[in-house]
Amino acid sequence: MILLMSAFAMHLAMAQQQSSPDGNVVLTFSLKADGTPSYKVTYKNKAVINESTLGFKIREVLSSYLLKSDETPVYSEKSLPDDSKIKKIEPLTQNFKVVDTKKSTFKETWKPVWGEESEILNHYNELLVQLQQEKTHRKMNIRFRVYNEGVGFRYEFPEQKQMPYFVIKEERTEFAMTGDHQAWWIPGDYDTQEYDYQQSRLSEIRAINQKGRQANLAQTGFSDTGVQTALMLKTDDGLYINLHEAALVNYGAMHLNLNDKTFVFQSWITPDANGAKGYMQTPAQTPWRTVIVSNDARDILASDITLNLNEPCALADTSWIHPMKYVGVWWEMITGMKEWSYTYDVPSVHIGKTDYTTLKPHGKHGATTENVKKYIDFAAENGFDGVLVEGWNIGWEDWFGHSKDLVFDFQTPYPDFDIEGIHQYAKSKGIKMIMHHETSSSIRNYERFMDKAYQLMNQYEYPAVKSGYVGNIIPRGENHYSQWVNNHYLYAIKKAADYRIMVNAHEAVRPTGLCRTYPNLIGNESARGGEYQAFGGSKPNHVCVLPFTRLIGGPMDYTPGVFEMDISKNNPNNHSHCNATLANQLALYVTMSSPLQMASDLPENYRRFPDAFQFIKEVALDWSESHYLEAEPGAYITVARKAKGTRNWFIGNTAGKDFTSKIHFSFLEPKTTYVATIYADAKDANYQTNPQAYTIQKILVTNKSKLTLHSVAGGGYAISLYPLTNKAQAKGLKKR
């Protein structure tokens, strides 16, 4: 009994706490009686994360040691573990002692190159716990940073002879939930994030998981209770919780695997082709694991934890990085009107050998010189920055489904795409061309040509590239989000920076705030984007979930701006429907903030609605302030943003259900009158039957004004606000 009491007293003595600067968030670290590290989190005295264990299962230590009787490590090549020894390697989960703890406080304000704010406060209290295993002498530190809106923590491994190299079998980080929470989630998958979000209780995930796995060209599930991050949760007593990661570098992406009996999530790292979860060389560190929490959903959207946990900008010069609004030869192919390929005459393409000049074009190629010039003209007429062209380069005839290594060269245009002529024509119109590099997930091939591809972009003054990773990864057996492949994505970003090129990667790993360190990462897709509206449609509330999930890690190239919802009017053979109203599509330019925004629809559809298109032409891409006015996951989001370098504001609301929005303009400058142009759902608007029903009205507002607007399900509204500069502007306008 005395021994038990002594052990319990020691356990309590090991407990360490760190609170947020405002005291609302409290992180508690402790060692269990067996030396297992654990933590818990509370918010305003409410449990957020119950006691959860930390650590790793080790598959292999690549430099083992023998212990003498005095426990001094003796190294020998002969001591490398055989298969039987590997199974017996002591995990990094227990038998730890606390060597030291350190507390500190940090506060700074930094300026992002682009984003939702011109300045970001990074203010946290830190707890560093230094651990060592009793017998192996292996060292593992855990660093916690506690913010007003949550907690970030990571593992750090000092350089050590006991463990210079090791292979991770499993990361054993737990997130113990306090109950059967509501969750907004997509199935765990090593190769795709392009799923419609599900809303359910945690206990219901198992029954729904397989039904939520829509077919994709590459997908690899791992569990009926596995989900992806960022995961959005809501407790029955009104707490909003978001689980994600930050600064994903040299590591596999983290999923979460749920024990649906205990409601405990375990980190589930994407493995490589050999099943290993990570190859580590000390000194090393993992990405940050993040817990964002508040009793107000708006705080989740406004949180900067993910960015703050990333390293400062690594680029000495960022003057060449500019937000871009663009159109593109894309929707024609997506809807099936045109094709990426040039000919039907070859069963397979041999890069460097197939002579396209001898082949008959099939006549459906979208990326022709003539067609591209039409988009350049449209972009120039309407004040856009760039034009994206997909299908310009040879190789699209057999580009996916064949596990093909040498699939593109990223150099050679089709015979009907005059790359020099288009460059000169675009330049004469003040338009920048955006390059497209579909890799077909042949990573080795992309890296084979990467320098030449970027040099070609420099030659023709392409400032940005949209890269794609459709299909199964080559090297074969690798997954889209494994350590090695994630390292490739970052390699491409760094290499692009050498050539002053901005990157917009599609089908790549979901963002984790790396755009702070490498702001030339101007966008990602990495979720179910706007193209799925032409592939059968997405749920009408999809865009009310994405800001709570995918966008927690960084902006998305969602490709909004669909004006013709009946896709059959573009292509009679495609009977898909865009599940949104036209006003909703306008609002996305504000609610889903991104420095790279596409007007995705065809020019002719915009010409049908020039008054609504005006908002897309005017809306900003870069912001000095953002105020989240209303928010509920999957239901509604209303946000106001101030355009950087101006006095102009823009407001967007998207609604996943019928919603009456009530906003106060208190964020506006005092003693200033603004002309507000409101683009809203008409009374009879319906995303299925009457999606193009909208109204436009102008009113005068001040910072004392209030406004009530109704948004239908799948609908919303958009507002532009400009300071009144002369009395003539106010003629005939009512003041609110």
Image (cartoon, rainbow, N blue to C red):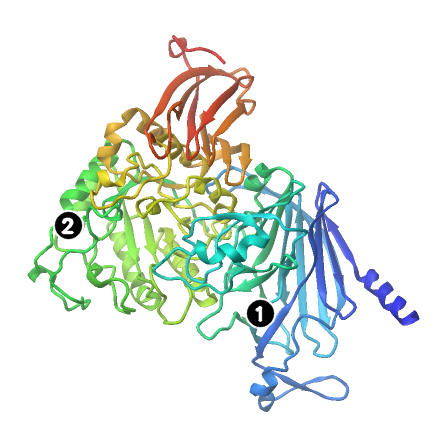
Circle number at residue 577: none
Question: For residue 161, what is the image quadrant?
Answer: bottom right
Q: Which of the pair 377/203 is nearer the observer?
A: 203
Q: Does residue 653 appear left or right of residue 359 in this picture?
A: right
Question: For residue 30, what is the image quadrant?
Answer: bottom right
Q: Which of the pair 545/170 is nearer the observer?
A: 545
Q: Give the structural element (helix, strand or loop) at label 2.
A: loop
* Residue type at numbered disc 1: Glu
Q: Which of the pair 204/156 is nearer the observer?
A: 204
Instruction: Give the quarter of the figure containing the N terminus.
Output: bottom right
Q: Is 659 above or below relative to 1? A: above
Q: Which of the pair 153/514 is nearer the observer?
A: 153
- Earlier in the chain: of badge 2 and badge 1, it is 1
The residues bearing labels 2 and 1 have C-alpha atoms spaced at a distance of: 49 Å
Q: Does residue 302 appear left or right of residue 458 in this picture?
A: right
Q: Callout 2: few (<14), some (14-19), or many (20+) C-alpha neighbours within 10 Å?
A: some
* Residue type at numbered disc 2: Lys
Q: Position of residue 675 (x, y in %)?
A: 43, 17
Q: Position of residue 254 (x, y in %)?
A: 53, 60
- Residue receiving disc 2: 364
- Residue receiving disc 1: 170
Q: Position of residue 628 (x, y in %)?
A: 54, 33
Q: Does residue 183 appear left or right of residue 651 in this picture?
A: right
Q: Residue furthest front?
A: 207
Q: Give the structural element (helix, strand or loop) at label 1.
A: strand
